[in-house]
Image (spheres, rainbow, N blue to C red):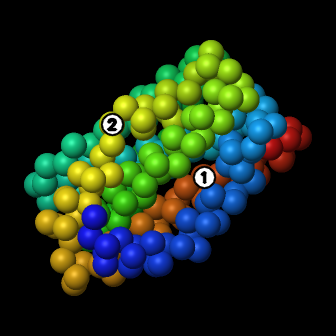
Amino acid sequence: MSTTLGAYLRQSTLDAHRNLDRHRVLRPLLKPGLRQEEYTGALLALYPAQCQLEEAIHRGLHRLQLDYPLLSRVSALAGDLTTLAQRLPVHDGTACLDVGRPGQLIGLLYVLEGAKLGSRVIAHNIHRTLGTQVPSRYFSVAQEEDNWRDFWRFAECHCTEEEWLSAASAANSAFRLFLSCLDAYQAADTVMGTRC
């Protein structure tokens, strides 16, 4: 890992990352008292943001003509929701994350690949509290491949120091996207009179 770039991205996204981790919709995923409705709600809230993030990365890889071993988790998330008898949330396909520079691509990949590290802890808690029969492919699939080292090798090749600011800005945009989707889910859930 490029420790200098890694430290820069960690520091630049610290507040946004912390806000996401502490969000009311996601917090229960790490608690021993996790309830199935909280778990289902978190998946529903994450789905639109995961779709948009992965689509932006695909567009960026194509636009910049770069090759990266991207492991999509959207189908796993959709499968979990379908197994839980949930209708997939509407995703309008509006591009809110732009990727025209290598730094922007690295910033989005930083969020995507970094999320897999947290997924391992979440998957363990889901299995411990809700049982192994609960569909949890979205969180568990992250354990099957470790792209974190691949990501840092890719970042070192394609993110020069001149691109660091773009990388940090894109990463913060991705965190804000997830936060806005979680907020939208929470607001809709409150209006419907159910608990988060």
Residue name at image x 33 percent, y 57 percent: 109
The image shows residue 177 at horizontal and vertical percentages of 52, 59
134 and 92: which is toward the camera: 134
* 166 sits to left or right of 44: left
User: Can I make out residue 138 in this image?
Assistant: yes
Quadrant of the snapshot with the N terminus = bottom left
User: Can I make out residue 169 in this image?
Assistant: no
The image shows residue 65 at horizontal and vertical percentages of 10, 54
37 and 143: which is toward the camera: 143
Q: Name the residue under label 2.
A: 145
Residue name at image x 51 percent, y 35 percent: 139
Q: Give the residue type at disc 2.
A: Glu
The image shows residue 127 at horizontal and vertical percentages of 64, 27
- Helix, strand or loop under label 2: loop
Residue name at image x 65 percent, y 32 percent: 126
The image shows residue 44 at horizontal and vertical percentages of 62, 37
Give the quadrant of residue 104: bottom left
188 and 47: which is toward the camera: 47
Q: Name above or below for residue 132 compared with residue 149.
A: above
Q: Name the residue under label 1.
A: 181
Outermost residue, left side: 65
Alpha carbon distance from label 1 to label 2: 26 Å
Query: Quick one: label 2, few (<14), some, or many (20+) residues within 10 Å?
Result: few
Give the quadrant of residue 161: bottom left
